[in-house]
Each structure stands twice: as C-alpha cells, then as structure tokens.
Amino acid sequence: MRGTIIRRILQGAGKLLRDQRGNAFMLTAAAVVPLIGIVGSAVDIGRAYMTQLRLQQACDAGVLAGRRAMAAGTYDDAAEAEANKMFNFNFPAGIYGSSGLSFDSEPSGTSDVAGTAHATLPTALMYIFGKDQFALTANCTAKLEISNVDVMLVLDVTGSMASKANKKDSDTKIEALRKAAKDFFATLTDADIGDGRLRFGVVPYSSSVNVGQILYDADSTWLSATDLLPSRTYRGSSVEERCTGKGKNKKCRDVTVYEYRYENRDFPVGSLEPGDELTFDTGEGGANVTVAWDGCIIERQTTDFAADKTAPDTAYDMDIDMVPTSDDATKWKLFLPAFTYDRQQTSARTWSFDAGDDDESFAEVGGDTAACPVAAMKLTEMTKADKSTFDDYIDNLQPKGFTYHDAGMAWGARLMSPTGLFASENATAENDRPISRHVIFMTDGDMKTPPSNLSHQGQESSMPRIGATGKNQESDAIARHNNRFRQLCERAKKKNITIWVVSFGVGSNTNLDSCATSKKAYEASDSDELNEKFQSIARQISKLRLSQ
C-alpha cells in the first residue's frame, strides 16, 4: 500500500515536470520588473536627452543675443535682458515638465559672453527604482570674431550736420555721428581677431575731400605742379570822386578804385605738401595773399556727360583705379579758395570797383561753403589699444560746407580698391586669406552742389567741368553729380566692396538706395537709432560663433 502511494506521487511529479502549459505566463510575470526598468529608463533618458538638447539650444541662443546686443563692448543690463528674453523664448518655463529653471549670463574676457543654464526634470517611471529626477546643466559661450576685414567710414560732415536730427534729440547730428563711429570702432576691435587683420579708414567729405597728405606720401608727382583756377589779375588803380545825396545834403569824397581782370589763372604751385604756404598777388590792389594748403584737392581731368549717360573713358575723375602718369591730366590739383574768384560767367572779364565795396558778382570763394574737411585716414591696421587715437580723430570732425556725395564715394573706393592706387597694401593680407571689404556711407541729406561754390570739381559757374548749363544750372548740376555718385558706387561694388548706406535725420532716396549693396540701406531718425544702425552693421561685418 505504501509503495503504491509513493509510486503515484512520483508519477504525478513526472507528469508535472513534463507539462509546459502556463510556462509563458510564469516567465512573463518574472520579466515584468526588469522590463519596466528597461522601458522606463529608455523613456526617461529620452526625455532627459531632448530636454538637455533644448536647454543647450536656449543657452546658445541667449548668449548669442546678449553678445549681439552689446554696444561698444559693454555687457550692460540691456544686453543681459536681451539674453534672458531669447533664452526664455527658446525654453519656456515648464516645458517637458521641467522645473527649477535658471539662466545666468555674464561677460567673459574682453569680447565674449558666457552663460550657464539649469533645469530639473522629474522622471516618469524610473522613480520606481529610486531615480526621481534629472539635474540638467548647459554651458555656452558666444564669441565675436573677425578674420580679414577692411572698413572705410565715408562720413558726411557738411554744414547741416551742426543741427539736430529732430527737436527731441539731445545731440546735434555731428555729435551723434562721433559717438556712433567711436562705438562702432569699439565693437569691432573688441572682437576676437586671432591671426586675422582689421583695418580702418575714414573719408570725411563735404565740398571736397582732404587726401593731399595721403597722395603726397604715396608719390608727390601724383599732384600737379600747376593749378588752373578762376581768379583775378590786378590791372591798376585810379582815384575817383564819389558823391551821395543831393543839394545841400550832397557829400563827395575821393575813393581809390582798383581794376582787375577776372580770368582763369594757372598758378605755379610746385611740389607742395599740406601745410606748406603759397603766396600770390590776388589780394586787394594786387597785394600778396599767403595761405597754407590744407590738403583738399580738385579732381583730375573729366569729360562732361549728361545726367542719364555713362561716364566716358576720358573722365579720369570717375576712374577709381588709375594711377597718375606723367600726363598732367591724370593728376590731382590743389583746392585753394583763397585765390579763387567767382566771376558768374565762363569768359574772362575786366571789372573796376571800389576797394571797400562788396561786389558779389566777383566775390572771393571761401568760408564755410568752400570747405576743406579733416584729413582722410588711410586704411590702417588697428586694435583696441588704438581706441584713444581713433576717438581723437573722430572728435575733430567739424560740420561745414555743401554736400558732394560723389567726392566721398570716389575716395572711399580709391583708398580701398585692391587693384588701384594702393593695390600693394590692399590686394592681399599676410595670412593669404580673403579680405572682406566694407564702405560705411553716412549722410544726413541730399546732394547740394551750387555751381558758384568751389568744390572737388572746381567752380562750375566760372570753369564748367561737369557740364551743368542753362536756366536751371543748379538743378542740372545736382542731377549730374547724382549720376556720377551712382556710377562710382557701382564701380566700387564691382571690386567686391560691400556698401552700407545710413541716412540720418532724413528719409532715404533712390540715389542712396541704389548705391547700397542689396538690403544694406538703413535710416536713422535720431542719435540712438544712428548708434543702433552702426552697431547692427558692426555685428554683421564680424561673425558671431559659439565656442562651447
């Protein structure tokens, strides 16, 4: 009996061992716990990865915005606010269920902005195994970098710059320009240059441009030894009785009357350097007049062409690359208002008048209208250490004279062209990398070119050079100067020079818009906007990159 029970137990146990029904259920039950761990970790780690990536992107965006908003290399509250705004836009509070969000940014070194972002992400499943959250951190740094950059500031310093852009502005336009230019310099020189090269040049312009020293230093023979100007020659004097009133009120006196012949005179100036003095007998009664040449020039030979025509090859003043030869027509002449007289007609003429009278028909050309601006600055390699030198130069800019945009553009292009007067300096950099070339052209108004004014094109009413004629001579002169300006802009752009145009205190116009490289024309209504436009240009010229 006992043996039968044991045998039956053994038989039952054998059947149970051989029976596979229900095994899958048991195995599944056994695998549930590790399976939850695997799936949970995949889900939570994936969420953490996406959140970390988004946090890093927001951090990067924040420091880039902060660095972009820096003015003159100063990371102030406004720049920090821009960084925070951009970070919060890219990483809204509570995204992916995160909490404990923070973002801090600060200047790093002289030109960088560094940031750190933190966030806490709760787990969805891994808390079962004791992991209830992820502590996420992102570090980021934005750098402003420059490789090889040439910048030429072509600045309108005409008389209207002495006024304010609007009644609410605290600064005059020239004061606003000085600040914007200095901050522009600071922003670019604060950038990380590395083994690159950053050069600055400045061409202040009004009635003419002051490039005499630059030309003299390059080759004194580029300046003509003679100077043909509308002037006068003393012919003698006589004493005449002049009376006023009638009857008992009649009064007479003897006056000395001087006689002059108003004509074109070819003055021998020799080889002259700015600051050297010249003496000629164009004064009252043939007296000698002595003045020092300031350095402004009159353009070389030109051929007149209409406002809707293309400049001919013989218009040497329109050539931004031609190097002067022995031919005097290819050389520049001296701008000498003290010896220039407006005779209001193109033919020579003799005239007598009292020495004390002011005859506007034969007036000396000078003062604030025939203005010679501060000497231009040739492209020069500069760093942050040169800020005081640059600032002092900009502070010397003074507003006077009429507006000749073509004078400024011609010399901005000439001093920068890689194939012209200074090709040996401009064509390549020592590191053999490409050079990015930029003209920043700022003006506060339209062309204003009175034919009676002595300008870089001489004195049109007495010695026509650009061909402005007729009853509407002044408007014709403006149209012709604008045509020259536009063509000079196109010639500069063909040299791969980017032209940025900033209209200050006035709206832009078709001439300025067409001069600018595509989408590079700006308008500024007050001093703050002018500074902002200059800063925007500086940021676009340099390159922002992430270094972390």
Image (spheres, helix red, strand yellow):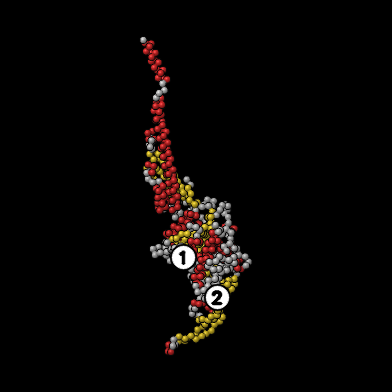
Q: Amino acid at mark 1?
A: Gly
Tell me residue 204's x, y (percent). Answer: 50, 64
Helix, strand or loop at disc 2? loop
Mark 2 and mark 1: span between their CA atoms?
A: 30 Å
Q: Decide if residue 402 is in sight here.
A: no
Measuring 50% from the left and 77% from the top, which residue is drawn there? Answer: 361
Q: Estimate how packed mark 2 is, as few (under 14), some (14 to 19) or many (20 or more) residues with alpha carbons within 10 Å.
A: some
Q: Which residue is mark 2?
A: 346
Q: Decide if residue 71 is in sight here.
A: yes
Helix, strand or loop at disc 1? loop
Q: Which residue is mark 1?
A: 445
Is 61 rendered above or below residue 48? Answer: below
Q: Estimate how packed mark 1 is, as few (under 14), some (14 to 19) or many (20 or more) residues with alpha carbons within 10 Å.
A: many
Measuring 49% from the left and 57% from the top, which residue is drawn there? Answer: 518
For marks 2 and 1 on the same chain, the one whose residue lies earlier in the sequence: 2
Quarter-of-image position of residue 266: bottom right
> In this rendering, would 133 be left or right of 346?
left
Measuring 39% from the left and 40% from the top, which residue is drawn there? Answer: 121
Q: Are marks 2 and 1 in contact (CB under 8 Å)?
A: no
Measuring 39% from the left and 65% from the top, which residue is drawn there? Answer: 167
Of the pair 70 and 294, the residue shown nearer to us: 70
Tell me residue 146's x, y (percent). Answer: 51, 52
Quarter-of-image position of residue 46: top left
Tell me residue 232's x, y (percent). Answer: 55, 77
Q: Amino acid at mark 2?
A: Thr
